[in-house]
Amino acid sequence: MERDIRDSNEAKSVREFYSMLYAPGVGHVYTARDVSEIPGHRTAILSGSCFEGSLESGPTSKVYRMDLDTGAMSELHGKPSRLPRGSPDGSRVAIVAQNEDKSHERILLLSSGTQQVQEAPELNGLIEDIQWSPNCESLLIVVAGLGADLAGYQGGSVIPERIPRSDGWLPTVTNDRDDNLWRRLWLLDVASNTLRMMSVAATNVWEACWVGSSRIAMVRSSHHSEDSWYGAQVSTVDIASGVEQVVYRPTDQVASPVASANGRTLAFIEAICSDRGVVCGNVVVVDIASCTVRFADTLRIDVTSLSWRDDLTLNVAGHRGEYTVVADYCIRDHVLTEHWSSDELTCGEWYPTARPCSEGGSIIVAEAYATAPQMAIARHGQLRLVKSFASPGSQAATERCGSIESIHWTAPDGLDIQGWLVSPTQGASRAPLVVDLHGGPIFANRNRWLGKLRATPLLVQRGYCVLYPNPRGSSTFGQPFARRVKGDMGGGDVQDLISGIDHLVESGIADTARIACTGTSYGGYLSAWLICKDQRFAAAAPISPVTDWYSQHWSSQAPSFDKGFLAASPYEPGNKYFTRSPTMLAQQAITPCLVLAGALDKTTPPGQAHEFYQALRENDVEACLVTYPNAGHSLRGYPEYFDSAARILIWFGRHLARR
């Protein structure tokens, strides 16, 4: 495969397709996040993404205001900006914006009724969250230093300096002591426009929220490394005295802390997790005065989003199997009231997300395979459409991209397994099949918009079926189901996948001679592992894979992950560090393999892809290694995303042609 494939038919088809979906160059907003209603205004604020320039230059984020009755949108700040946060009294909106030379970020406070802008002092780092105090007098700010680890969902590398140094020949020096490696908690006093650091030395703040206007709750650890997040605990700190109190030491991982405005109740999500920022599990409720802890009964909803509607009511979103659910939970009466659930639509970026709406129900950004993201109000089991973000060319682009359906099959041990099957419009009979495997392993495939599925819509246009399975270890079928992968990565979940392929072959949908696999991160691992365990595959394309658990442990930013999920030690020879590593079994593979990786990836470092490529070539297996020099984990940046899609089309087209 050539280094530059931009003139290939596949690359041209990718550009044409995504140009129709995203409408680059005209400022079309194609999706939104960080949506919330401004109290008393019947308007919402949001971060909207658009390709202001070319596809290759990537999207820009800007902050917008939207009328919740008409869907009319206007820019709140005309320059690149993000993280809009409305004050509780509706008078101001805080946003994060870059300065003119893009060397630093700062917070801007915009008055709702005037054109007044207050510029907060600059902070040297990446602002990851801002929140207003209930009395509107202060903002808490979580800032990651330039050099701090980024989680897999953030790109899996480190936060770079914003202005490249001219003395670029200088070496990279790695140690544990640099101050810029930490995530710190700051407070901005709005009246005086002054900043104060709240977190103390040897405290890394992953997330934080106000507890009333005098205390703050934190998900914190005593080290800055990504690895330390797995053992983070929940603490509160008194702003006046600085006294910290531990309120919860979790068994698993915790995230998404939110406190009622009166400061009496704190809630957060606890779950077994494989990745920071991708959390799906149980709701823990803590009475601040007594430190009494209890678990909310959310009626089998694996919760992924939390916010307070009022001092007694939590607004939640999450999964119940393949269904996306939005609901309210009353902490006094312990009653869950569903607003909406669907297997035909989902919402949110990584997982379902919702925010309470004054008319009742919740604001969501809904989507489905053939439905572009749309702002909607979920209430009384229905959706009220506020605005579709579909481009003018979206309908034409999706006409030949087929349809999606939820399917179930039975694993060899009798476990029910669910997945999503995308099939051509005219149906499928003995079609080539691509199995696309999600990362994690504790994550889930769901009914996502095709604009977020890399090569899938273009494969379906060419007559392929694509299966998105949710094997054991997936996160939407309860914590016991998710735990089944712990200590057995590449074991029972592989049998779930093989039985799913067998089901589609036996149903006459898939051609047994034309089956391929791909996936990202843990999905990349499974893609590499499958072709070492089963020789039926005609092609594979692992992206950002793990292929050698030994070197993964010593080179990744989160070695606790492999120790915990393999339930083994890298110091003991002959255990699952060896027996579950694709590189160690490469002599059993015969499948042509395209391996893709980002050179800046610290989650699954590029050496993993290189090792597997070398092992395949040593065993005379056709292989191609593609490493993107400026990319991190999962190749979600641009133009790498489009280039990788084109390369997958070329590779699968070459090896899955009708025989």
Image (cartoon, grey):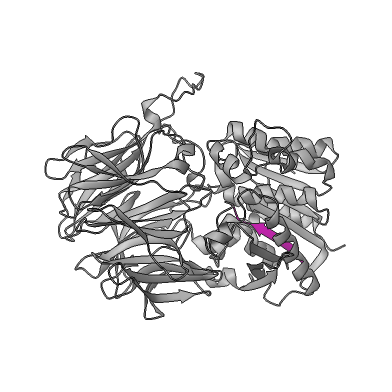
324 or 373: nearer the eye?
324
SS assignment for the magenta stretch, majority: strand
Which residue appears farthest toward the right when viewing the image? 659
650 or 555: nearer the eye?
555
Residue 62 versus residue 221 in the image, above or below: below
Residue 274 seen anywhere in this rendered image of the structure: yes
- Which quadrant is the C terminus positioned in? bottom right
Q: Which residues are magenta?
A: 432-439
Task: Judge from the rendering whether residue 106 lies leftward or rightward of residue 561; answer left or right.
Answer: left
Residue found at x 51% / y 48%: 275
**Horizontal and vertical percent position of residue 136:** 16, 53
Number of numbered discs visible in the structure rendering:
0
398 or 362: nearer the eye?
362
**Horizontal and vertical percent position of residue 85:** 27, 55
**Horizontal and vertical percent position of residue 636:** 54, 49
**Horizontal and vertical percent position of residue 150:** 46, 40
Residue 121 versus residue 12 in the image, above or below: above
Task: Judge from the rendering whether residue 287 lies leftward or rightward of residue 478; answer left or right.
Answer: left
Instruction: Give residue 141's quadrant in the image.
Output: top left
- Which quadrant is the N terminus positioned in? top right
